[in-house]
Amino acid sequence: MGSAFEVFMNFMNNKDDFQEPKKIHYRTIFVAPRSRETKEDAKKRAQHIVELLNEGHDFTELARQYCINYDEEKEGLQVVEVPSDNPDWRPPIIQDLQPGDISEVIERGETFAVAKFEEILPERIKEFREVQEPIRRKLADEKNQKNHERFAQSVREKADVRFTKTGEALVGKEQNFFLR
């Protein structure tokens, strides 16, 4: 296990390893025709959702009620990384929106989507407290690997392994880790 100083110095000397790209957060609700409904019925329901959102209703609650692929853990939240070579890129579903805006009904084949642009998180270096434990584990793994290699080398140096011609043919010199 690395000391607190070793962990901190690893962080300071490797900040590029802890770079997080610019991210966009937005929420979506996908609406599809229910049994015996037409595509037009689903579109009307999506338009009703937009009206409710514009009146101030909670997006997460509406997603829970109406979204065809609602995931309790994500609550409709989508997180995408912005390509570093295209910093102004946005997912098409929120292309023309600003943070806080709600889209109109977007037709997607047989389904409809409603999106809310939440926020843009700028590129950043993770804070030390966020990466302290992963660094500590990495340093411990590296130390264990070095100790294992030293032990294996000392065994090789002390070992006097001799094979008969038959044994050597069975194991093969390339497979014999004692002779390396």
Image: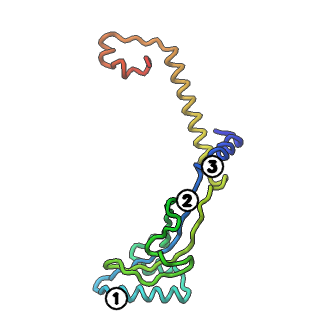
Vertical side of 139 occupied by 51: above or below? below
Mark 3 and mark 2 residues within 8 Å of each other at the beta carbon? no
Which residue is disc 3 drawn over? Answer: 15
Q: Of tags 1 and 2, which is closer to the observer? A: 2
Q: Who is closer to the viewer here, 37 or 46?
A: 46
Q: Of tags 1 and 3, which is closer to the observer? A: 3
**Mark number, residue 41:** 1
Residue 60 visible from this viewpoint: no
Give the distance between the C-alpha atoms of the residues marked 3 and 2, in whole angstroms.
Answer: 13 Å
Amino acid identity at mark 2 = Pro
Q: Who is closer to the viewer here, 176 or 26?
A: 26
Vertical side of 89 occupied by 171: above or below? above
Which residue is disc 2 drawn over? Answer: 21
> Residue at point 48% right, 73% down?
76
> Residue at point 29% right, 87% down?
38
Percent across and percent down for residue 78 are: 48, 69
Vertical side of 65 occupied by 131: above or below? above
Residue 8 visible from this viewpoint: yes
Percent across and percent down for residue 53 are: 51, 85
Give the distance between the C-alpha atoms of the residues marked 1 and 3, in whole angstroms.
Answer: 53 Å
> Residue at point 57% right, 57% down?
20
Instruction: Say what secondary structure mark 1 lies in.
Output: helix
- Point out the tag, 1 or 2, that comes first from the N-terminus: 2
Q: Who is closer to the viewer here, 66 or 7?
A: 7
- Point out the tag, 1 or 3, that comes first from the N-terminus: 3
Badge 3 local density, few (<14 within 10 Å), some, or many (20+)?
some
> Residue at point 59% right, 51% down?
18
Percent across and percent down for residue 4 are: 70, 43
In which quadrant is the C terminus drawn? top left
Amino acid identity at mark 3 = Lys
- Point out the tag, 3 or 2, that comes first from the N-terminus: 3
Mark 1 and mark 3 residues within 8 Å of each other at the beta carbon? no
